[in-house]
Amino acid sequence: MHQSDLIFEKLREMILTLALRPGEQLSERTLEAQLDGSRTPIRAALMRLENEDLVQRDTRGWRVTPIDTGELTLLSEYREAIEVTGVRAACERATDQDVAAVIVRLDRVRDICNAIEPAEQWRDQWHRAGTDFHIELARLSGNPFIVKSIERVMTRLARVRWLEVSTPARREQSWQEHKAIVTLIQARRADDAAQAASRHIRDTHDRLLRSLREDRQYLRAQGLAVDDTLR
């Protein structure tokens, strides 16, 4: 892997895990020292991240794109259209073995997280598992365009989805909703599976916005920029 690719992957991980905070100003010189890279691959990585809307340029240079509640609403609408279509396709195309494998992984992750302490560790584990679950659902559709779309959406949501599982009760609710969707796919109940997926996406969106509203002052105190461009 080339140095520019390594720097891109590292910066991307730092943004998605909030090691680099939303709204944080980025200095190319500081990044050079931090990532042991030269100016050219640093700038190339930042331009690639700009294409993913994870960083943006302003009059002072580069900064991490703030969390935008308006964008979250638009992403939820887009995600619902794509993912519900994928769930319907999965009911028709997915093999029994592939659906059963998703259920096994879902149950295994729940057992692992229930056994993990401290909370920060199970939250990280569940966050990754939740992202993987939705991508696996997309793969069950047999449509690579749906898979690619869901991968991009989940990347854009990665910085806020930890709020969905900030407590054990929320984690359990998320698991129950995931289990219901894939169980209905296993039963080939396309209409019910589509409704469950739609309801899950809308409820998740409502929970995220509610958490952002409730925690806005705390998040800003921690240096996380939260905007609202959709009124």
Image (cartoon, grey):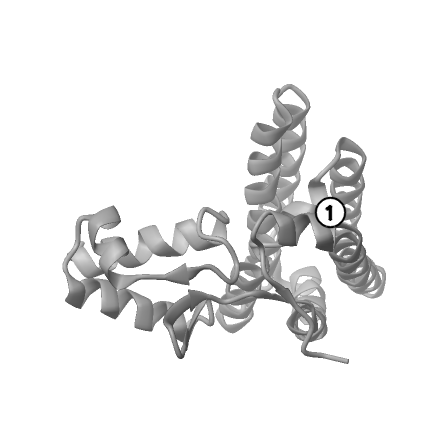
Q: Secondary structure at mark 1?
A: helix
Q: Please tell me how many numbered marks the rendered image carries.
A: 1
Residue at position x 81%, y 56% in the image: 210
Residue at position x 31%, y 73% in the image: 47
Name the amino acid, label 1. Answer: His
Q: Residue 172 falls in which quadrant of the image?
A: top right
Q: Position of residue 160 (x, y in %)?
A: 63, 54
Residue at position x 51%, y 63% in the image: 23
Residue closer to the observer: 177 or 70: 70
Residue 168 vs 189, above or below: the answer is: above
Position of 157 compared to 19: left or right?
right
Q: Which residue is mark 1?
A: 178
Position of 1 compared to 48: left or right?
left
Q: Position of residue 205 (x, y in %)?
A: 76, 61
Q: Position of residue 157 (x, y in %)?
A: 59, 60
The N terminus: image quadrant: bottom left
Residue at position x 55%, y 64% in the image: 156
Residue 139 vs 106, above or below: the answer is: below
Q: Residue 134 falls in which quadrant of the image?
A: bottom right
Q: Position of residue 168 (x, y in %)?
A: 76, 32
The C terminus: image quadrant: bottom right
Residue 23 vs 136, above or below: the answer is: below
Q: Residue 66 falls in which quadrant of the image?
A: bottom right
Q: Residues within 10 Å of mark 1 (few under 14, many from 20)?
A: many
Residue closer to the observer: 50 or 104: 50
